[in-house]
Image: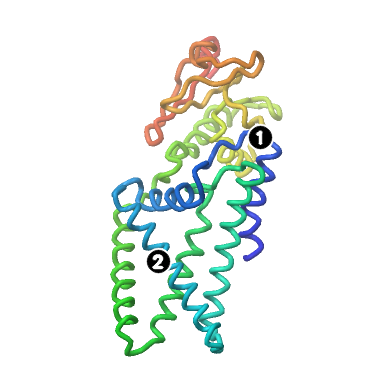
Amino acid sequence: LFLSILNIPLVRAMFYYQHRNLIEGGTQGFWPDTVSSLITASLLGRHGGWNGTIQIFIAVILILAFVSLLTRVWKREKMDLTDRFLLANLLLMSLCAAFVVLQWDLFRVRYVTQRWAVYFVPIFMLSMIIFWRRILSFKGNFLARLANSFLGALAVLSLINFILCANLSKFYTCPYDASTKELMGYLMKLNGGKKLSDQSISIGADWVFTPSITFYKIKHHLTWLKWPDWKGPGGYFDYYYLLPDKRVYREREASRDIDVSQEYHLTSIHRFDLAGTSLAVRRNDTGNR
């Protein structure tokens, strides 16, 4: 698990060097980009005024956790299992943060944000729970009782936030992907009964859909569908899957920005209400769909 989590930022850096177009992420710093974006995503964009307060809380928790461990080391007290677990989690979090910062300083790979940085959430939550267990060991201490009450109230508030923000249809950071499963089902309905040769049907889509379209192609063994790529819909395809608020893309051949709907005379054949996306074809192909 330790090595797997550390591999996440390394894989991201390798991806950047292969494609040179990694536009996800921030450039302001680890705290304003990574930490702030995770808080915003956790609150589903609501209660934005609480972002700064939560950042202060996170900083205080981490400082107190480190201080509690350093105090035991300074007093040469024996570390129990709780202390060792806390130390391991804090070191893992620190190493992951260091990787993110060094990638920006050395290679200008952007600071991870939102879903790219989601691995920090379970590490921090686990560290906080272990630290809570550490506090409970100080029985009869006023500060321990105060901290225990505070963390208990925080747990209740977190549960309430989870209930209010629970969403079974889409993710906050990628609502556009909510209808990709429905899209692939629609394509299978249109082409499933035809005798198609391998890699004979193409689909042009924004690069953000490439992972999910690839997933469903593999899952349903759609040999007739060409592999999607990361270059967008700026070319000639059998189908075009378009975002609701984006039509201008880079044309593959001439390397210029074009409105794909106008350039290729597209007409929509189906709209997916959940994501607001649409499936389109060139007008001269509508009779074949």
Q: Residues within 10 Å of mark 1 (few under 14, many from 20)?
A: few
In terms of sequence position, does the residue under pointer 2 or pointer 1 come before the other?
A: 1
Q: Could you tell me if the residues under marks 2 and 1 are in contact, i.e. CB atoms within 8 Å?
A: no
As helix, strand or loop, the secondary structure at mark 1 comes to loop
220, above or below 73, in the image: above
Asked if residue 254 is positioned above or below residue 165 in the image, the reply reads: above
Q: Is residue 155 left or right of residue 186?
A: left
- Residue in the picture at 47% in, 21% down: 247
Report the residue marked by disc 2.
60
Give the CA separation, mark 2 to mark 1: 37 Å
- Quadrant for residue 288, please give it: top right
Name the image quarter holding residue 15. top right
- Which residue is found at the position 60% from the left and 17% from the top? 251
Quarter holding the N terminus is: bottom right
Mark 1 = which residue?
20
- Tell me which amino acid carries mark 1: Arg
The spot of residue 223 in percent (x, y) is: 67, 34
Scheme of colours in the image: rainbow
Could you tell me residue 123's position as x and y percent?
51, 64
Which secondary structure, mark 2?
A: helix
Q: Residues within 10 Å of mark 2 (few under 14, many from 20)?
A: few
Q: Residue furthest front?
A: 74
What's the amino acid at mark 2? Val
Q: Is residue 206 left or right of residue 35?
A: right
